[in-house]
Amino acid sequence: MKVIDNATLPHAQLPGLDHVTLAGASMGLHKLSVWRQTIAPGGATPPHFHACEEVVLVSAGTGAIHMASGSHRFAAGTTLVIRPLEEHQIVNTGNTPIELVGIFSATPVGVFKPGGEALDLPWSS
């Protein structure tokens, strides 16, 4: 059992995106990761996919998730369910930050570019 003060966790950034790993391998988990991300207006995740299941809980903001099946709009109070190997990109289309929590069925979470090459992220190390 661990009790973690989220305010003490390190942040990592990409342009327009702030990331915090809330739980994962470094906290003793073997099959689960939880991330919190804030995406600034006009910001986006890189196009990518994971080899595991992903559930995204959107608590603030509006945006779109771009996938092979098309672009799907979402807002606060939305849950995005993303299957393994499904390429996607989350884009903030609104005027306020998107706040989300990503839950993954793996730890560490592999993140891959659409061509299959590993995506080097500042929180992967």
Image: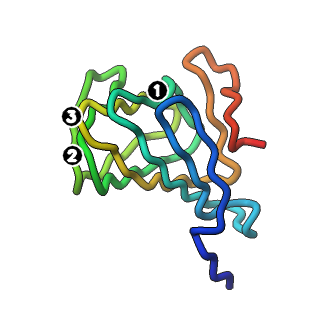
- Specify whether 41 is left or right of 9: left
Q: Amino acid at mark 2?
A: Ala
Residue 120 image point, x, y percent: 71, 29
Along the polypeptide, which appears first: circle 3 or circle 1?
3
Residue 63, quarter of picture: top left
Residue 115, quarter of picture: top right
Residue, x 70% and y 38% (percent of image)?
122
For the residues labelled 2 and 1, say whether their Cβ atoms are less than 8 Å apart. Answer: no
For the residues labelled 2 and 3, say whether their Cβ atoms are less than 8 Å apart. Answer: yes
- State which quarter of the image contains the C terminus: top right
Give the crowd class for mark 2: few <14, some 14-19, many >=20 residues within 10 Å.
some
Residue, x 52% and y 32% (percent of image)?
85
Q: Secondary structure at mark 2?
A: strand
Residue 117, quarter of picture: top right
Depth check: give the residue in front, 37 or 41: 41
Residue 75 got which mark?
2
Q: Which residue is mark 1?
A: 87
| CA gap, disc 2 and disc 1 | 20 Å
- Specify whether 111 is left or right of 57: right
Along the polypeptide, which appears first: circle 2 or circle 1?
2
| CA gap, disc 3 and disc 1 | 16 Å
Q: Is residue 124 above or below residue 20?
A: above
| CA gap, disc 2 and disc 3 | 7 Å
Q: Residue furthest top?
A: 115
Q: Amino acid at mark 1?
A: Glu
Residue, x 44% and y 55% (percent of image)?
101
Q: Which residue is mark 3?
A: 73
Question: Which of the two discs, 2 and 1, sits closer to the camera?
Answer: 2
Residue 98 image point, x, y percent: 34, 45
Depth check: give the residue in front, 100 or 115: 100
